[in-house]
Image (tube, helix red, strand yellow):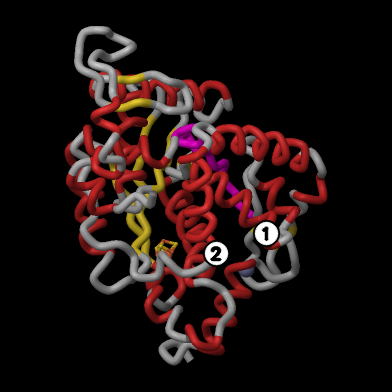
Amino acid sequence: MKTSKLALRENPLRFDPGRAARLPLECSRCGARPSFYTRRYSGESLCQECFVETTVDKVRRTIAKHKMIERGDRVGVAVSGGKDSLSLLKILHQLSAGRYELVALTVDEGVAGYRDEAVANVKGLCSQLGVELVLVSYSGLFGFSLDQALDWKDEREQSSCSICGVFRRRAIDEAAAKAKVDVVATAHNLDDYVQTFMLNLLHGDVDRLGWLDLATKGEGFPIRRVKPFTEIYEEEIALYAYLSKIPFQSVSCPYMHEGLRSEVRDDLNEMEAKHAGIKNVLLGSALEVASRLSDNESAKTSMPCERCGKPSSSGLCGVCRMTELVRQHSKYTG
Ligand code: SF4
Ligand code: ZN
């Protein structure tokens, strides 16, 4: 069954109407409060408070296990304004307590009718938590908005998200440099991770499997990147966000459902529904493959881009190659 974003926003239990009826009465952790949610892959049935506490604790353990953040780090949190990244900001803020400093890094891609609400949500949470915000935009950095960069849909093979992703990664790096951070934390969750792994396999991008290693920087990233939600299911972040009163965006990015990723997401969700925990197993395999491939130096080779001088795996970096394509085809940028 597919998870409707609207259903999640109204009531996270509605995406499986039979689930509430099947829950045991008491939380299997505290034994005091009524259970609310069952982690099918582990068998625990948790009350709301224990669900939130164990989710935060899982993030804390992932950070410690993979040495993602060190004491005294200045941590840039990539916050798009969606529920996942706002939840990450809130959890990292809760865990930081004197150990490290946080700054939110937000990119305004320039998508009419979509970004304004997200940026307002980011500003709201940052001011509530007292976290500094650094905002950059595609227009300011590249000279065109995402709407303008994507207006040649009929002529191109790449999905909108793959074009956007190239610019977004650079934009985050620019924001990170501006904010002088030591490390950038992104809200990629377990589902994102295994989808990317499968997509790289399906596209034959074997080198990119090595970039998924949690200990590498990935192609051309000058600043270390970490993914503290790597071990958390997307569904559980949605529940955390709902219970923590994180605002859900009422509009989604209009470009998000293009491409193979949506199909891979649906297929993996279907498999998880039949075989609880299978995404967890796939994550373990993906991490192992990524770690073995990242030991292979050729997967990480980097040189300065001939045009912009940023690290690149070939003569021109992805951003300069994509900018050239956009300038050739988009009617706005000439
Ligand atoms: Fe960019 Fe895709 Fe995200 Fe939209 S959904 S902001 S196109 S990556
Ligand atoms: Zn370049």
For the stretch drawn in magenta, the main secondary structure is loop
Mark identifier at residue 218: none
At x 39%, y 49%, the residue is 1
Q: Amino acid at mark 2?
A: Leu
Circles 1 and 2 in contact, beta carbons < 8 Å: yes
Q: Nearer the viewer, residue 319 or 192?
A: 192
| Label 1, residues with CA under 10 Å away: few <14, some 14-19, many ≥20 | few
* Residue 106 drawn above or below residue 34: below
Residue 309 x %, y %: 65, 64
Q: Nearer the viewer, residue 115 or 128?
A: 115
> Left or right of 308: which side holds 18?
left
Q: Amino acid at mark 1?
A: Leu
- For disc 1, the marked residue is 202
Residue 171 x %, y %: 46, 60
The quadrant of the rendered image in which ligand 2 is seen is bottom right
Q: Nearer the viewer, residue 329 or 105?
A: 329
Magenta span covers which residues? 220-232
Element at label 1: helix
| Label 2, residues with CA under 10 Å away: few <14, some 14-19, many ≥20 | few
Residue 112 x %, y %: 27, 74
- For disc 2, the marked residue is 260
Q: Label 1 vs label 2: CA separation? A: 9 Å
- Dividing the picture into quadrants, the one containing residue 237 is top left
Element at label 2: helix
At x 22%, y 33%, the residue is 244
